[in-house]
Image (cartoon, rainbow, N blue to C red):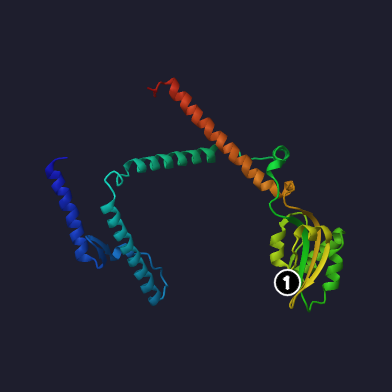
C-alpha cells in the first residue's frame, strides 16, 4: 500500500470521526475514545417510564466507561504477543465453520426414527447406567377445599380400579378439585410430590413401603393420595421413566457416527487425490 493511499484512508477516517463529533451529542469519554448518542440507540424500549429510561441509560454509560478503563489498563500491561489474538480468532472461526457444517449435515442426513424395539434393546443392554438417583412414584392425588361436599365421593372413586369410575373421577375433579393428578402410568419424583402435598416423612423408603392410601389436610385443603407403585433410589429405573433419555442417547450416538463417517470420507477422498502430505 503506497503512502498516498494510507494518507487518504487516515484522512477519511478522521473526517468521519470529525463529522460524527459535530453532529452527535457525546455521552462519555475515556481517554480518546468517545461514546456517542447513537451508540446507546435501542437500549431503552418504547413505553419505558422517563425515570427508568434515565436509570437504564446511566447504567449503560457507566458500564461502557468501566469496560473502556479496564481495556486501556489491559492494553498497557499486556505484552504485544499477549495482545496478538490473530491465531485464536482464526482457530475460533475454523471451529465455528466446522460446527455449522456438521450441524447442516446432521439436519439433512440424520435418521431420527427410533423404534420401541431399539429403545428396549438399549435399555436391556445398559441397565447398570439406569440406576435411580431419587425415589420415584406412580400416584393419583386430588386436592380439595376443606369445605367441599364431594370428598367422600371422590375418595371412593379414587380407590376404584373400574374404568367407568376412573372416568367419573376425572370428570368430577375437573369441576370440583383445586388440583389433581390422575395419570398413574407416568412416574414422578417423590420429592416433587412432596412440594405439592404436605407429607411429613424423615425416611422416604420406609414411608413408601408402608403406605398406599393417604389422607392429609391443612387449614385450607384436603389431600387424597393413592400410591400405585414406587421405586427406591439405587434400584434400576423403569424403562418408561428413561425412554426419552435413551432416545436422546441413541440420537447423539447416530450423530457422532454420521460426523465420523463424513470425516473419514473427506480424508480418504483427499488422500486419493493427493491434496495433502505429511512431512
Q: Residue furthest left?
A: 4
**Would you place residue 120 above or below residue 20 in this image?**
above
Q: Quadrant of residue 183?
A: bottom right
Horizontal arrangement in the rendering, residue 93 relative to residue 28 (left or right): right
Q: Which residue is drawn at 72% across and 41% down?
A: 127
Q: In which quarter of the image is residue 162?
A: bottom right
Q: Residue at x 26, y 45 (%)?
A: 80
Horizontal arrangement in the rendering, residue 32 relative to residue 259 (left or right): left
**Would you place residue 142 above or below residue 133 in this image?**
below
Q: Residue at x 82, y 73 (%)?
A: 151
Task: State the residue position of label 1.
Answer: 178
Horizontal arrangement in the rendering, residue 255 relative to residue 95 (left or right): right
Q: Which one is nearer the viewer's eye here, 134 or 102?
A: 134
Across and down, in percent, residue 105 comes to: 51, 37
Is disc 1 placed on a helix, strand or loop?
Answer: loop
Horizontal arrangement in the rendering, residue 209 relative to residue 125 (left or right): right
Amino acid at each position: 500500500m503506497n503512502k498516498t493511499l494510507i494518507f487518504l484512508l487516515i484522512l477519511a477516517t478522521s473526517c468521519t470521526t470529525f463529522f460524527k463529533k459535530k453532529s452527535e451529542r457525546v455521552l462519555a469519554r475515556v481517554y480518546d475514545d468517545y461514546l456517542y448518542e447513537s451508540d446507546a440507540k435501542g437500549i431503552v424500549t418504547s413505553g419505558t417510564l422517563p425515570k427508568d429510561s434515565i436509570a437504564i441509560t446511566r447504567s449503560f454509560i457507566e458500564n461502557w466507561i468501566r469496560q473502556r478503563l479496564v481495556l486501556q489498563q489491559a492494553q498497557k500491561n499486556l505484552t504485544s504477543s499477549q495482545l496478538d489474538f490473530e491465531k485464536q480468532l482464526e482457530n475460533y472461526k475454523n471451529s465455528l465453520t466446522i460446527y455449522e457444517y456438521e450441524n447442516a449435515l446432521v439436519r439433512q442426513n440424520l435418521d431420527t426414527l427410533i423404534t420401541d424395539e431399539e429403545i428396549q434393546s438399549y435399555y436391556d443392554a445398559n441397565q447398570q447406567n439406569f440406576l435411580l438417583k431419587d425415589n420415584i412414584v406412580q400416584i393419583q392425588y386430588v386436592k380439595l377445599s376443606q369445605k367441599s361436599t364431594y370428598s367422600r365421593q371422590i375418595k371412593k372413586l379414587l380407590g376404584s380400579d373400574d374404568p367407568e369410575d376412573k372416568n367419573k373421577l376425572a370428570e368430577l375433579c375437573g369441576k370440583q378439585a383445586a388440583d389433581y393428578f390422575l395419570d398413574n402410568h407416568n412416574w414422578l419424583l417423590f420429592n416433587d410430590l412432596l412440594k405439592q402435598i404436605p407429607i411429613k416423612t424423615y425416611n422416604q423408603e420406609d414411608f413408601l413401603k408402608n403406605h398406599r392410601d393417604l389422607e392429609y389436610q391443612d387449614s385450607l385443603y384436603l389431600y387424597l393420595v393413592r400410591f400405585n407403585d414406587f421405586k427406591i433410589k439405587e434400584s434400576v429405573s423403569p424403562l418408561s421413566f428413561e425412554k426419552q433419555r435413551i432416545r436422546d442417547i441413541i440420537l447423539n450416538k447416530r450423530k457422532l457416527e454420521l460426523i465420523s463417517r463424513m470425516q473419514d470420507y473427506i480424508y480418504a477422498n483427499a488422500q486419493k487425490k493427493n491434496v495433502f502430505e505429511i512431512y
